[in-house]
Image (spheres, helix red, strand yellow):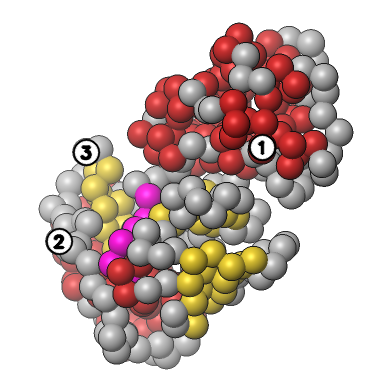
Amino acid sequence: MLRVHFTAADLVRTRVSDGADPLWETVLSLHRLRDSRPDPVLAAAGRRTGVGARHGRSLGMLLPLVPPRGYFPDFLTPPESAAGIEHGLEALMSTSRTRLRAELTVLGGRNPLPPWTRSLADGEPAVLRRLARCVRTYHHETLGPNWPHVSRRTHSDRALRLHALWHGGAEAMLRTYGPAMRWHAPVLEVAYPVDRDLHLDGRGLLLVPSYFARSPVALADAALPPTLVYPARARGSDDASRPPRCLAPLLGHTRAAVLQALGGDPTTTELADRAGVSLSSASEHAAVLRRAGLVSSVRQSNAVRHALTPLGSALLRGDGVSRSREPGAHGLAPLVPREPPDVAG
C-alpha cells in the first residue's frame, strides 16, 4: 500500500491536471501494449510489434525501459510534459547523468538491459536524442490518431473531480477516488504493489487522470514533485442501465430522461438527440441538473460537454447519497465556471 500523508497546506495545494499527460500516456500505453487483448487504441500497434519498420525500431528502444510490470525510470515522465510532448522531450534530453545512472541502475537490478543503455546512463547526447525521437514517433503514430478519444475520457473524469472540489473542498474530492484510493484523513491510502509512505510536506499533490493506467502509479523518487496518476473513469462506467422508478415523479419524466442520457460526456446537441428533446430544452434541463449538483459541464472548443457527478451517478443507481460539505474541508478557488453558457456542439 502507498500512504500519502497530507498537511493542511498540502490540501490547499492539491490539484487535478488539465488533462491527459502525453508522456505518462505514452509510457503507460507500453504496459497495456503487452496485454493479451490490448485496448483498441493500441491494437494496430500491437500487431506491428517487432516489425523492422520505424515503429518497430521505436518499440525496440522503448520496451526495455518500460517492463510489462513494476518499476520504470522517472526520467521518462518529467513534469514538463504537462505543457505538451515537446516540452517533455526537451526535459527528458536534459536529464542529468547522475539521475540517468541512478534510475537505470535500479531498472537494471530488476530487469536485464541491452548494452546500449550503458551509453544512455552516461548521458551521451546522441543516445538521448535517439530516445526522444523514438518516444515522439511512437506517440504520434500510435496515440496521435486517437488522442481526442484519450482526452475525452480524462477531461470527463477531471470534470467529476473538480465538481467535488467545488462543492466540498479537497477532502471531498479525495473521497471520490475509491476503491483503489481511499481517504482517511490525513492520509490517502492507495492500493499499490509495494509498501511505502509519501510525505508531501507542504508540496501538495498533482492528480493526473490517465486513459491507459491499470491502477494508481506514483513517481518512485519521493524528492520529485509529488504526482499520482490514476485510471480515468471510463465513459458511462457510472451509468445505471435504467434509473430508479422514483426519479420520474421526483424530477419529471423529461428531466429524468435527460439525466439518464448523460452517460459519458455528451455535448448539448448529443444530449438533446439521446433524450429526444429540443436543443434549448436539453440546455435548460442540464442547467437545472447542474445547479442541483447532479451534472458537471465544461467547455471544450465550441461545445459544452456534460458529465454525471458522483452525486448524479449515485442518484441513478439509487444509492441515496446526500451532498454535504465535509467538516473542516479546505476549499479551493473554482477552476471551471459553475454555469458555463451552453452552445450547440
Quadrant of the frame with the C terminus: top left
| Numbered badge on residue 339 | 2
Above or below, comparing residue 184 to residue 180 in the picture: below
**Label 2–label 3 contact, CB within 8 A:** no
Residue sitting at x 41%, y 55%: 206
Q: Position of residue 273 (x, y in %)?
A: 34, 53
Q: In the image, which residues are magenta?
A: 11-17
Instruction: Return the residue at label 3.
Output: 302
Residue 45 visible (yes or no): no
Toward the right, the furthest residue is 112
Q: Which residue is mark 1?
A: 102
Residue 304, x across and y down, in percent: 25, 49
The amino acid sitting under disc 1 is Ala
Q: Amino acid at mark 3?
A: Asn
The residue type indicated by label 2 comes to Glu
Q: Nearer the viewer, residue 179 or 2?
A: 2
